[in-house]
Image: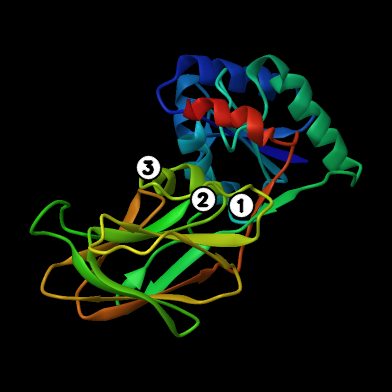
């Protein structure tokens, strides 16, 4: 049994909790390089944790997303630092016992997982990793006189053609993030859909929830350089005119550990 642990960068409390969890486990333990440096031990890059049986992410949703981008289908367990997030169900005071219990369940072949859909963007010159939250297609900058001419189609059917700052395709997980800040709707984590939300569009259409089996295409035209951005972190330059395809990624993120109380997590939005 091999457990990887990734703690929030630059957070001494997260690193200390990582050490407590690691010392309590009857398993091989590897820390990511930054956590290992804080603990004065050897570490692994998160991308080297793909062969672990479980990876524990300690921190906020950003730390979880960072970890998820690196470990593929390895199950991830999220531990928060006192504020319930949408991806980190385990509070710090329960973390050691919860991780030990999850590792024991894995060892006994009794562990269960929740699988979360990701959205994948593809197109000419676009090489982005799957996104657990969203893919945004945006212009160089927002505001009057900027933006993009976009055409959105769902399985080839025209949904919208307009000028906008951009368009977001979000997963249920990401519906509470960038999508929500652009007045898109919340999706329950158990919903099997993506939400398409235009950003400050001229004569905008309302947000649209589509089945994850649908193929979404975004055609970008005009003279402005555009960008496709996965989870707010990884971007690819898009040179109009071009068409991007957004669809369900082949790999899903597997989450282990206690079930998230979605409605309790909504309190972080208040």
Q: Nearer the viewer, residue 197 or 55?
A: 197
**Residue 1 placed where, x, y %?**
78, 41
**Residue 80 placed where, x, y %?**
58, 25
Q: Nearer the viewer, residue 159 or 194?
A: 159
Tag shown at residue 70: 2
| Res. 125 image quadrant | bottom left
Q: Nearer the viewer, residue 74 or 146?
A: 146
Tag shown at residue 181: 3
Judge whether 261 appears above or below 119 on screen. Answer: above
Q: Mark 2 packing: few (<14 Cα in 10 Å), some, or many (20+)?
A: some
Whether residue 137 appears in this view of the structure is: no
* Residue, far left: 145
Q: Which residue in the protein does label 1 denote? A: 50
**Residue drawn at point x = 76 percent, y = 48 percent:** 113
Tag shown at residue 90: none
Q: SS class of the residue under badge 2?
A: helix
Judge whether 39 appears above or below 144 on screen. Answer: above
Q: How far, Cα to Cα, is label 1 from label 3?
A: 33 Å
**Residue 228 placed where, x, y %?**
31, 63
Say which label, 3 or 2, has the lower sequence index: 2
Q: Nearer the viewer, residue 15 or 147?
A: 147
Cβ–Cβ below 8 Å for labels 1 and 2?
yes
Q: How many marks?
A: 3
């Amino acid at each position: 049994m091999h457990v990887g642990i990734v703690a929030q960068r630059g957070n001494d409390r997260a690193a200390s909790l990582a050490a407590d969890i690691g010392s309590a486990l009857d398993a091989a333990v590897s820390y990511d390089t930054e956590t290992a440096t804080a603990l004065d031990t050897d570490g692994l890059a998160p991308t080297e944790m793909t062969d672990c049986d479980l990876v524990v992410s300690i921190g906020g949703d950003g730390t979880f997303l960072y970890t998820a981008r690196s470990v593929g289908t390895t199950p991830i367990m999220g531990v928060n630092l006192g504020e319930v997030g949408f991806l980190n169900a385990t509070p710090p005071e329960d973390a050691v016992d919860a991780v030990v219990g999850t590792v024991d369940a894995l060892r006994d072949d009794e562990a269960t997982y929740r699988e979360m859909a990701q959205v994948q963007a593809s197109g000419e010159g676009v090489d982005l990793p799957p996104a657990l939250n969203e893919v945004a297609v945006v212009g160089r900058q927002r505001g009057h006189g900027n933006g993009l001419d976009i055409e959105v189609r769902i399985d080839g059917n025209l949904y919208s053609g307009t000028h906008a700052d951009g368009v977001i395709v979000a997963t249920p997980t990401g519906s509470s993030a960038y999508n929500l800040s652009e007045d898109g709707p919340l999706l329950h984590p158990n919903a099997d859909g993506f939400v398409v939300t235009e950003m400050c569009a001229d004569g905008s259409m309302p947000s649209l929830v589509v089945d994850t089996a649908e193929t979404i295409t975004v055609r970008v035209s005009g003279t402005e350089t555009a960008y496709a951005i996965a989870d707010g972190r990884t971007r690819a330059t898009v040179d109009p005119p071009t068409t991007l395809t957004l669809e369900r990624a082949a790999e899903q993120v597997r989450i282990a550990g206690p079930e998230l109380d979605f409605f309790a997590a909504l309190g972080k939005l208040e």
